[in-house]
Amino acid sequence: MPRFHLVKDRFFKEARQLRGVFDERFGDPRSTRADRFVWDYWHVPGQYTHLRTPGWEYFPEELYRRFHESLVLWGRRTLGCWDISPPWLSCYVEGCEQQLHSDVPHGPWAFVFSLTPNKRAFQGGETEILRPEVLDYWRNFAQAPDRERDSFTRRIEPRFNRLVVFDPRFPHGVTPVRGTHDPRLGRLVLHGWFTEPRPFVEGAHEDEVVSAVLDEGLEAAGEVLADLSPLHGVLSVRLKITKQGAVERIQVLANTLVRLEAPGSGESTALRRMTRLLRALSFGPAKGKTEVTLPLLFQ
């Protein structure tokens, strides 16, 4: 089944240190220290309202580097994306929000990492994502159990140290924040996009060997899947390769495939065909096992 969003709680072991930098700078509301004056009040009428600043410049260099490396490694292992865009640090207080929008072509996955306190002093502030069935509304209309908001959107609360990753093609936003003007009590998140999708190899097999086998196999896959186009999205899988070079297991990590014509009628067939093709690959012998995170882009 498609997995259009992922949630990883307790993501970064130094999340409290990141949060501590923000709290220390706003600890004295009368302070005029220079590092308090780095925020842009971003307001696009009817669309975006919040405070933002470049996240990679806000925190001490070494602390940010460790966060960046943790997020990038997770993206390589889970999505097959090698890097992230320079993230924004955004703060939401009374009246801040993002109306529904989509992000194309920043990257195949968007992320939101929350530094928001779990004991929230505000209402709202959830990441809101339009549900897939709404984008194919009439196909599911008769079977829908209700017609209220939760049947149309998915809302994910900004819990502290929670990483939310989702397909940015889906209309999404941030529900309006109500209840506090204090930045220390508002919604605080780092957000951006995962970028540069390509295979990520860990183990005994040489990268060059894996790449050569994959290139040949994926060229054949194009012919196998040609009659199913047009598909759009990303299928990220993990190949577990034995020391003899056989593919012993294929794990679907993330799947955002949709068929642009006659939605819902070709994604599962593509997955079955691709799985059969990948299982037939042989990477040759090595001194040990290997795992490959493979992102397959359909455009």
Image (cartoon, rainbow, N blue to C red):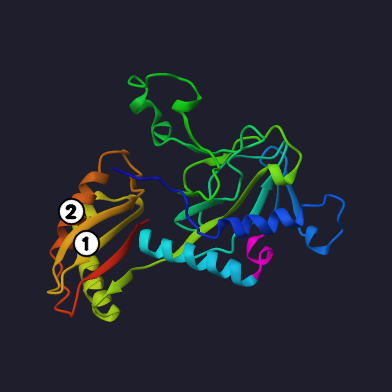
Note whether 285 is above or below 59 in the view shown.
below
For residue 273, the mark is 2
Write the residue at 28% across / 58% down.
237
- Looking at the picture, how far across and down is residue 11, in whole percent? 47, 55
Amino acid on which disc 2 is placed: Arg
Write the residue at 77% across / 53% down.
26
Q: Is residue 93 left or right of residue 289?
A: right
- Looking at the picture, how far across and down is residue 72, in whole percent? 47, 65
The reply to whether residue 202 is visible in this rendering is yes
Q: Is residue 33 left or right of residue 257?
A: right
Answer whether residue 58 is magenta in the image.
yes
Q: CA distance from mark 1 to mark 2?
A: 8 Å
- Looking at the picture, how far across and down is residue 107, in whole percent? 48, 58
**Mark 1, secondary structure of its residue:** helix
First to last magenta residue range: 53-60
The reply to whether residue 53 is visible in this rendering is no
Answer whether residue 150 is magenta in the image.
no
Q: Are marks 1 and 2 in contact (CB under 8 Å)?
A: yes
Quadrant of the image containing the C terminus: bottom left
- Looking at the picture, how far across and down is residue 277, in whole percent? 16, 60
**Lower position in the chain sequence, tag 1 or tag 2:** 1
Amino acid on which disc 1 is placed: Ala
For residue 221, the mark is 1
Judging depth in this view, the residue of 43 and 192 nearest the camera is 192
For label 1, the crowd category at 10 Å Cα-Cα, with few meaning under 14, some 14 to 19 and many 20 or more, is some
